[in-house]
Each structure stands twice: as structure tokens, then as C-alpha cells.
Amino acid sequence: MTLTDGDVLRTESLAKRFGPVVALRDVTIHLRRGEVLGLIGDNGAGKSTLIKTLTGFLQPDSGAIFIDGEEVKLRSVAHARQLGIETVYQDLALIDELPVYLNMNLNKEHVRRPLPFLDKKRMRAEARAKLDDMGVRIPSVETEAAYLSGGQRQAIAIARAVYSDAKILLLDEPLAAMGAKESRIILDLMNELKKRADLSMVMIAHNFAQIIDVCDRVNLLQHGRITYDKSVAESSARDLTDLISAEYRLRGNATDQIGE
């Protein structure tokens, strides 16, 4: 397979094993520039392993990863970040005791010279400007993260990743355990981010209606392989539900046969 000019990310035949367990068998995906790709699949399908491979946390046993048409060997998470790949996980990696503006600048704080003092005024102003630019509404950048709602916390984590020069944003269950109101905050934020031609996203989610709402295309990962790749215009939440239900039925039949 050859890369198209519009692909910012592509994998070809990625495989990953953990001893006797095969997590990824032959995964080929592609992400177009400015696109939001929804990644769905049952628990244990290999979604988290794929994300960790794309972030450099895991190295594949075989296969290839291409960024902007060039094959890369992701040596570490830091290396992936240098190439513009940022990830937001369910646990968010926010520090509850720190205010929003310090969480936004975590590990990249502005320091006044020659004395090594934190330039808090500059960080507060930049954090406020970035959040306003993305339409993220919070009481104050002085608010400690512990006092934010789940949707606000997730929005802060996404904003921090976007403003770390990300060109590929991987979102691992960004809407998990959220109510409708908080989920709407993140879905609205992602729809706003879709206007940025220089940012592409992959979102893992279990709620198929949310996938249809915010994504451009959807991939289904089953048994370590991509078995479905269509635009959301060609899909529906019912279609995706039927695909997963069919897998459950197959599993049930296999269990019945083993029992016999």
C-alpha cells in the first residue's frame, strides 16, 4: 500500500504479542490531515495496545508506522511528542492541588531570569488566552483542578495537549463515565477543534452515537484487526451496534459448542 498525500499518520500491518496473547495481528489504519477518526471495539480488542504503540510507549513486533509519509520508529513517548503526537488518557494526568494555569504549563513552566522565579503572570495570561481561543469555559485559571467538573477537567487536558504543538491527538475514552451535560462540553470542543486544518484526531469511544456526532470516519478493531472502515456518512449508531452484537453472538455460539 502507498501513502496518500492527505495522510498525516498511517500504520501498515502492525503486530504486537504479549507472550502467547496476540494483541495486534495485522493493523493497517490511516488518518487524513484534519480528520477525526473514531476507533471502536469490544474490550480486549486491542485498542489500548494500538494507542500505546502510536505514542511510543510500546514498540510493535512487526509492521510500520508513517508520519507525513515517512516511516518512523517511535523510540519513546518523548520521541512521539517531538513528532507531534499527543495523547489524552482517561486519568487526565492533572494535578488536583494545582490551579488550571499551572496544569496547562506542567513541565514547561515559564521562568523569570536571571532569578529562577516562576512567571505566574505570563502563565495565567497565556492559559486564559488559550482556553478562550478554544471556547473552554471555567470559573478562573486560578481554580484548582480538584474543583472542576469532569468535563472541564477533560477539556483542560485536551487544551494542554493541543497547545503542545500537537498535530495528531489521540483521545483514549475522553467521554468515559461522564453524564450527558459533561460529554456535551467535550463533543462541542472537538467539533471546534475540527476547524483546525493542522490537527488530526483519533478518538476511542464506546458510545456510537457520540462517534457519529463528532467523527468523520470510523474503524472497528476486532481480534487485533481492522474489520470495518467507513465514513460516518455511510454508517449509523445502529450499524455499529449490530456489528458488535454479531460478535457477541459468535462468541456465545463458540462457548455453546465448547460446552457440548
Image (cartoon, rainbow, N blue to C red):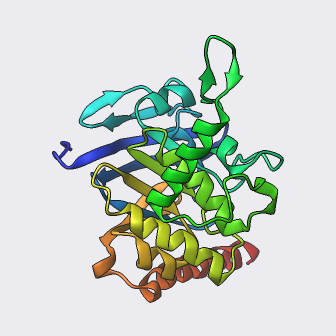
The image quadrant of residue 14 is top left
- Residue at 31%, 71% (x, y): give it: 230
Q: Image check: 94 left or right of 40?
A: right
Q: Image check: 76 left or right of 239?
A: right
- Tell me if I can see residue 23 in this picture: no
Furthest toward the bottom, the residue is: 238
**Front one among 226 and 20:** 226
- Tell me if I can see residue 89 in this picture: yes
Tell me: residue 217, above or below residue 213: above
Location of residue 135 in the rendering, given as x and y in whole percent from the top left corner: 48, 65
- Residue at 56%, 45% (x, y): give it: 125
The image quadrant of residue 192 is bottom left
- Residue at 30%, 48% (x, y): give it: 198
Location of residue 64 in the rendering, given as x and y in whole percent from the top left corner: 36, 34
* Number of marks present in the image shown: 0
Q: Where does the N terminus fall, quadrant-wise?
A: top left
**Front one among 100 and 152:** 100
Location of residue 42 in the rendering, given as x and y in whole percent from the top left corner: 60, 68
Location of residue 243 in the rendering, given as x and y in whole percent from the top left corner: 47, 79
Tell me: residue 48, above or below residue 64: below
Q: Image check: 179 left or right of 161?
A: right
